[in-house]
Amino acid sequence: MASVIKRIVHRNYPESCKLGMCERRGKLLGMIKLFCLNFTKWTTLPKCKCPAPSLSEGLFTTHDCSIITIDKRLCPAPFPPVFADYTISGNCSGKLIGQLCLLKCIDKNFRHRRTYITCQRNFTWSSPRVCGGQRQDVRVKSGSMQGLGRLTACDKN
């Protein structure tokens, strides 16, 4: 709380003392006058209450007057690497912290056909779980398979 501007500076106190106003548009809480009680002590000093602060957008005060910041920053749209084994499914731009973005694996033969990335506290995306490496077995009944399963050649039967 702010202090009262006018202060008592002399030693010979009268029976009462009128105080000044609060600084910077503050509101005085209590009596504006102090009274001497039984020549031993003064009545309770008033206190100054500050007006509500003028806050910029994204800030507000709580009941105990602490200031809270609302961070409205969002994660940008993620971009997969040039040779990524996944694509971005849907619109993932403008996500809040903790929100997910769905990724789809390009090769349908992998067990995990979908994976997610999360918008992190530093407004970057988490690393995706790799689509490759956990491949399902592809069975060719008649024919041959070349490469990693993306190219297959079947018999003419």
Image: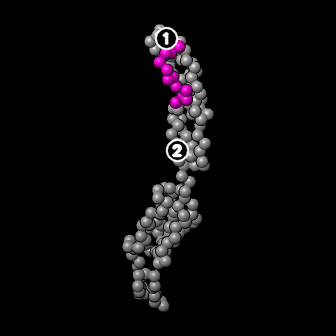
Residue 101 or 140: which is nearer the viewer?
101
- Majority secondary structure of the magenta segment? loop
Q: Are marks 1 and 2 in contact (CB under 8 Å)?
A: no
Tell me residue 138's x, y (percent): 41, 77
- Where residue 73 appears, x then y in whole percent? 55, 56
Q: Amino acid at mark 2?
A: Ile
Q: Nearer the viewer, residue 56 or 92?
A: 56
Q: Is residue 53 above or below residue 58?
A: above
Q: Position of residue 36 (x, y in %)?
A: 50, 13
**Residue at 46% of width from left, 65% of height from top?**
115
Which color mode does the image show? one colour
**Marks 1 and 2, how far apart in space?**
43 Å
Q: Position of residue 124 (x, y in %)?
A: 48, 62
Q: Is 128 positioned to the left or the right of 92 in the image? A: left
Observer-nearest of 119 and 41: 41
Q: Can see residue 104?
A: yes
> Which residue bears the numbered disc 1?
37
The amino acid type found where label 1 is placed reads: Leu
The question of residue 111 being in magenta is answered with no
Q: Which residues are magenta?
A: 3-14
Q: Residue furthest top?
A: 38
**Label 1 Cα crowd, 10 Å radius (few <14 / some 14-19 / many 20+):** few
Is the residue 111 above or below the residue 148 in the image? above
Q: Residue at x 47, y 69 (%)?
A: 113
Name the residue: 50% across, 55% down: 97
Residue at the spot 52% in from the left edge and 44% down from the top edge: 68
Residue at the disc numbered 2: 68
Reply above or below: 72 against 144.
above
